[in-house]
């Protein structure tokens, strides 16, 4: 019995020992592989570029703009960062930066002792290299702060130290560190707080910047000037302690007041447009907020950069000409949408004359009366009813009885042509003739044609609807025109083709246009309407 008990204990001990060995082994493997996700290669570390806000590409993969305008300006350490600026950060954030290999063991045990004495976390031990790891590769894998992320930071720090020189690590640090108020990097912070570039900083200003990484929201000088001043003066004291500044200069430096720029620095993207705003809103709805905040996304769109530039120019030029011609003081606006009628891919989208981020996008949201642009649906309904472009209609003054009221639609300049063909009626945009055609085919039939083609707004069953009095959006109208040009098939507008990470790993891929789209018009009717519209242009 005793022998069995001993054997049982030995089995348990051996089992526990095996579990310990396996735990150590898998922990080691976990660290070596950066949490089984795979560590970045030396090449990936050496070629890393800080997030510039994501890329929005056109159909030919040409850059159209940024997904977000990031408040960051990347700089060159040797050219742009004075030595005293470097010293301010090293004295504050990692005084043994040039001596350790990524983890400062002295700093670690010092912080551990301080925190144990205090009974809470009072001092951190993150080195500059660890902060670089956190703000480059670790945040992409583990956005939430955790012990797991800290271990990955340690592993990444070693890899970074083996892949980059100290100067390269410091340069990367100055470009990725978060400085508060939505600002990343020392150069952007310098412009935001002091209205100058890093090369123009004074020593107290450099100390103020070095004071921020510890707790940017706590020490921001715009909101908490007293805290910021105290923290800045502490940084100056640390610089004296490390031998970067002589003790005799300290009182004078600490006596200098904070001089903060009145206006915040906010970069502008010269290529920004209503089209890019529409892309951003669509990406937000797909990603639902979270992922877009942590990944440098690449968004491939259906847009054509050249067509987009031409559309924006055309809206500005034409709206300006109309305003000048009419002598109006109020700003004349406009919108334009261009799609590929074969598949619904949007090639250009202009939502107004003067773009500002987040403003009303008329191309997508403005419900306006299309007027004569609605008439092709009247004639499309007529073609479906058996008429042809050569069919004739009277273009004479007309009165339409509406209950107790009489509606008398008139032609432009009261110019009437008598008996004319349907083609001629569309060429001249003859209101009287078009109303007679609508009476012949019926308003419900016209509404049905418009809805099947792609109009989604409500269309009232009233006689004036034939002249485009019902409000629709530009994107609806253009989509509904596509069946005229493609043989009678309804298309689905598409703006974004795919969303991927900066490493080109797909996050979301749009479904391809329908290979068998719904046939909403007889191809012969579509051809005849297109022929009539060509005559309008050729007239």
Image: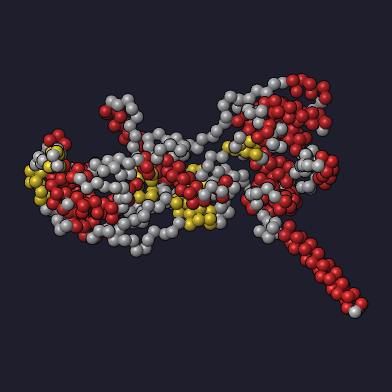
The front one of 166 and 79 is 166
Q: Quadrant of the N terminus?
A: bottom right
Q: As rendered, which of 212 and 482 lies closer to the eye? A: 212
Name the colour scheme: secondary structure
- Total number of numbered labels? 0
Q: Is residue 327 above or below residue 389?
A: above
Most extreme residue toward the right is: 2
Residue 471, percent from left and from top: 29, 42
**Residue 55 vs residue 135: left or right?**
left
- The x, y position of residue 407, in whole percent, is 14, 39
Q: Is residue 229 above or below residue 405?
A: above
Residue at 20% over, 45% down? 462
Which residue is more in the foreground, 86 or 208?
A: 208
Within the image, what quadrant is residue 309 found in?
Answer: top left
Looking at the rendering, in which quadrant would you find the C terminus? top left
Residue 283 horizontal/vertical position (percent): 49, 49
Q: Is residue 164 left or right of residue 264?
A: right
Determine whether, in the image, residue 115 is placed left or right of residue 206. Answer: right
Q: Please determine whether, in this image, residue 123 is positioned above or below residue 494.
A: above
Residue drawn at point x = 26 percent, y = 51 percent: 450
Instruction: Let me know if residue 84 appears in the view.
Output: no
Q: Nearer the viewer, residue 187 or 178?
A: 178
Q: Is residue 157 visible?
A: yes
In percent of width and height, residue 164 lies at 72, 48
């Amino acid at each position: 019995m005793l022998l069995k008990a001993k054997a049982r204990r030995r089995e348990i001990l051996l089992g526990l020992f095996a579990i310990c060995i396996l735990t150590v082994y898998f922990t080691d493997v976990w660290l070596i592989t950066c949490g089984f996700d795979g560590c970045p290669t030396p090449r990936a570390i050496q070629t890393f570029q800080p997030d510039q806000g994501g890329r929005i590409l056109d159909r030919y993969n040409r850059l159209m703009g940024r997904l977000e305008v990031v408040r960051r300006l990347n700089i060159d350490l040797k050219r742009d960062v004075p030595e005293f600026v470097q010293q301010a950060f090293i004295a504050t954030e990692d005084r043994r930066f040039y001596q350790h290999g990524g983890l400062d063991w002295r700093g670690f045990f010092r912080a551990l002792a301080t925190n144990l004495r205090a009974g809470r976390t009072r001092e951190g031990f993150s080195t500059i290299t660890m902060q670089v790891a956190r703000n480059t590769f670790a945040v992409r894998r583990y956005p939430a702060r955790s012990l797991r992320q800290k271990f990955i930071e340690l592993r990444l720090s070693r890899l970074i130290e083996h892949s980059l020189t100290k100067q390269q690590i410091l340069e990367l640090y100055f470009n990725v560190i978060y400085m508060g108020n939505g600002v990343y990097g020392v150069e952007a912070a310098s412009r935001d707080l002091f209205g100058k570039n890093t090369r123009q900083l004074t020593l107290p200003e450099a100390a103020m910047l070095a004071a921020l990484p510890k707790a940017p929201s706590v020490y921001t000088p715009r909101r908490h000037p007293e805290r910021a001043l105290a923290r800045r003066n502490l940084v100056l004291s640390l610089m004296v302690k490390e031998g970067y500044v002589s003790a005799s200069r300290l009182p004078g430096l600490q006596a200098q007041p904070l001089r903060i720029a009145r206006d915040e620095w906010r970069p502008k993207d010269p290529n920004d447009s209503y089209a890019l705003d529409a892309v951003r809103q669509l990406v937000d709805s797909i990603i639902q907020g979270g992922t877009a905040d942590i990944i440098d996304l690449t968004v491939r769109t259906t847009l054509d950069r050249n067509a987009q530039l031409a559309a924006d120019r055309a809206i500005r030029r034409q709206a300006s000409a109309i305003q000048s011609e009419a002598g109006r003081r109020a700003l004349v606006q406009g919108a334009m949408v261009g799609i590929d009628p074969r598949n619904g891919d949007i090639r250009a989208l202009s939502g107004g004359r003067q773009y500002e981020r987040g403003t009303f996008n008329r191309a997508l949201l403005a419900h306006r009366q299309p007027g004569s642009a609605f008439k092709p649906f009247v004639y499309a309904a007529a073609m479906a009813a058996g008429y042809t472009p050569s069919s004739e209609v009277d273009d004479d003054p007309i009165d339409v009885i509406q209950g107790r009221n009489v509606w008398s639609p008139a032609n432009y300049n009261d110019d009437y042509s008598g008996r004319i063909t349907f083609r001629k009626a569309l060429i001249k945009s003859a209101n009287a003739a078009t109303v007679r055609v609508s009476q012949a085919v019926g308003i419900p039939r016209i509404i049905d044609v418009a809805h099947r083609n792609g109009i989604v707004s409500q269309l009232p069953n009233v006689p004036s609807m034939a002249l485009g009095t019902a409000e629709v959006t530009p994107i609806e109208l253009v989509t509904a025109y596509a069946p005229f040009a493609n043989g009678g098939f309804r298309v689905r507008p598409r703006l974004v083709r795919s969303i991927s990470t900066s490493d080109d790993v797909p996050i979301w891929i749009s479904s391809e246009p329908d290979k068998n789209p719904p046939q909403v018009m007889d191809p012969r009717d579509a051809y005849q309407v297109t022929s009539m519209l060509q005559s309008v242009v050729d007239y």
